[in-house]
Amino acid sequence: MRGISRRALLAAGVGGGLVTACGSNTGRGGGSGPALSQWYHQYGEAGTQQAVQRYAAAYRKADVGVQWRPGDYDQQTAAALLTDSGPDVFEGSPTLDQIQGGQVVDLTDLLDGVRDDFNPAVLTPKTYEGKIWGIPQVIDMQLLYYRKSLLADAGVEPPTTLDALIDAAGKLTSGKVKGLFLGNDGGAGVLGGTPLYAAGLRLVTDDGKVGFDDPSAARTLGKLHRLHADRSLLLGAPADWSDPSAFLQGLTAMQWSGLWALPQVQKELGDDFGVLPFPKDGAHGRPSVPVGAYGAAVSARSRHKEAAKAYVKWLWVERTDYQEDFALSYGFHIPARISLAKKATELRSGAAADAVRFTTEYGYAQPLLWTPAGQTAYQDALSRIIKDGASPESELRAVVRKVSAELDRVKKKSS
Amino acid sequence: MRRNRALWFWVFVGPFALGLALFTYVPLLWSVALSFFDAHNTVTPTRFVGLDNYTAMLRDDAFVDSLRTFLVFTAFIVPVTYVFSLSLALMVNRVGRVRAFFRSVFFLPAACSYVVAALVWKMSLFSGVRFGLVNTVLGWFGGDPVAWLSTTEPPWYWLVIVTVRLWLQTGFYMILFLAGLQRIDPALYEAAAVDGARPGWTVLRHITLPQLRATSVAVVLLLVVNAFQAFDEFYNLLSDARGYPPYARPPLVYLYYTALGQGQNLGLGSAGAVILALVVAVVTVGQARWLRLGRTDADG
């Protein structure tokens, strides 16, 4: 009875059981051995889906079926990991609760001998208590795009401090063009911890404490409200920050977006654009850019854990030719392997070279201890600070309380 | 014969009863059970925490705030939808031959998906850029474009939410009122006319409204439950890849992120769902008492 009702609950209530029913199941290769199901989120760049299907088909020791999953991908994997019908191998960022809950498999031994070749910026957030829970596939990062001609017309230099950014956004705003686009929500979602790092702070310290319990946090976040109050921010654009359309259509002079948008921006604007990190603020500040990566992970509910691990090792550790193809041939990412990134000629000139430099010098990754509950509290507070002009001090006090409680909770679990 | 009848009863009713039990009652009870456990990323938790999830939820400013917001939202949207749909029904009821046409026209939006309507409102009518429909009209009069869904002062997003909800729902409740209106005995109006009651407000106040009591009670109950269960259009209007803004956040949207999002705190989410269900139950029972549910139109 227990088994049946649990499955029924999953099918109806959680929805996890149902999601596996849809989605394409193409890419079955000619391999023999156990059947593995591998999940990817929907990449926007043409050719990516065919590429991952080609990799899967080339694997001989298992029959790998690729599922390409549009929609809210992290939510889908979170639900599917509760069920027996979820993926064997999936790309994702295993959360701390998923690791502590034993939902993903320890992959430490797959990186024996090559661990140092993976960029630590993206490997660290996949590491918990010395063990590795996801093999980084590529490095993604976000940065500020600006239109050189519009800045020149307004007599504005590319901003290197937060105050200069706010002034520049104000000067670049006219009747038809806004100065800056940080997403339709005014920036609370996409900026996240970036302004804190630009103020020389961090989300969580290395010893697991709140990293922004400091007066300069309130000062920096409070400045973001001025962008909103000055009406320099583009809001309500047809496509959100992750898509460069607003920038390309001339709705805004500057836009925060991802490295993935670079090829499209380059194609449409030629030389008329530049890229910047999020500018520094205050005496201890330094520029910052968020970096992140999906990692290949193995579900603990997989019936073929060893086969799944072997496949992950083959694709994301051994086949560097596929890793290079995946990172550079469709859209634009920095390879997660240092040796591959060094080889890539595409990354040696122009804006791409700037982006690589920002990543190495100013990149920060969201720490594993930064839990979704803490993230929600912080994002709510940031939204109220930016849009409503709420007091940054009192908003941050509440967030610090909430995040401390979350840090205590996850630390208690590990001991 | 009797055994046969029992057999057929189960053949016809069984699958539905089974489906209802499996897909509604079991998950419901399971969720109540989960609310007493520390259920991070699991539906078969082992650590019993008593009422901890409930106290945590009631101390959670974001959840309490969303409950408060939705009490206010309900107090506003219910009377407004009621008045709109009743007025439409009274008007449609008075037109003669083209009644069927107008009835269909006003009912049609009810057949539209909440998701589709929300996207039309968001991307086309109330798009925040200068070429959005409403902003284009504003532009003719020299107004600046307004970012309808992103502006919190004044809270323009309510205008978008309320208009899409009215557009979607009014037609459906209008049909209920029309059915109620058509059941009123014309003799009552004739008698009133003979007694000298002037058509218009007096007749509406003393004949139409009392005669519509049962329909009204049903409509108000449905509206209240619907208001508390708001999810679809809110989620599609205001959420983005990074989550949902901290304003106009329905309790269900907040619980969705708590339990089913990356948070996967199923125990806490279930506790919130139970609290929400209790609030809805208390409000509807209280209201049914107050409106004397169960009395028929004739008792008026």
Image: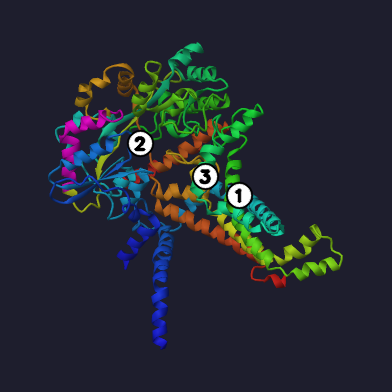
The residue wearing badge 2 is A208
Q: CA distance from mark 2 to mark 1?
A: 49 Å
Residue B151, visible in the rendered structure: no
* Screen quadrant of the C terminus of chain B: bottom right
Marks 2 and 1: which is nearer the front?
1
Scheme by which the image is coloured = rainbow
> Residue B159 location, x and y as percent?
61, 41
Name of the residue lying farthest toward the bottom: B1
Q: Is residue B49 above or below residue A197?
A: below
Name the image quarter holding residue A193: top left
> Helix, strand, or loop for circle 3?
helix
Given the image, on which type of amino acid does mark 3 rest?
Ala
At 51% across and 35% down in the image, what residue appears? Answer: A383
> Helix, strand, or loop for circle 1?
helix
Q: Which mark is residue B118?
A: 3
- Which of the two residues, B281 or A80, is positioned nearer the viewer here? A80
Q: Which span is picked out in magenta?
A: A307-333
* Disc nearer the start of the sequence (1/3): 3
Q: Is residue A128 left or right of residue B58?
A: left
* Screen quadrant of the N terminus of chain B: bottom left
Residue B209, visible in the rendered structure: yes
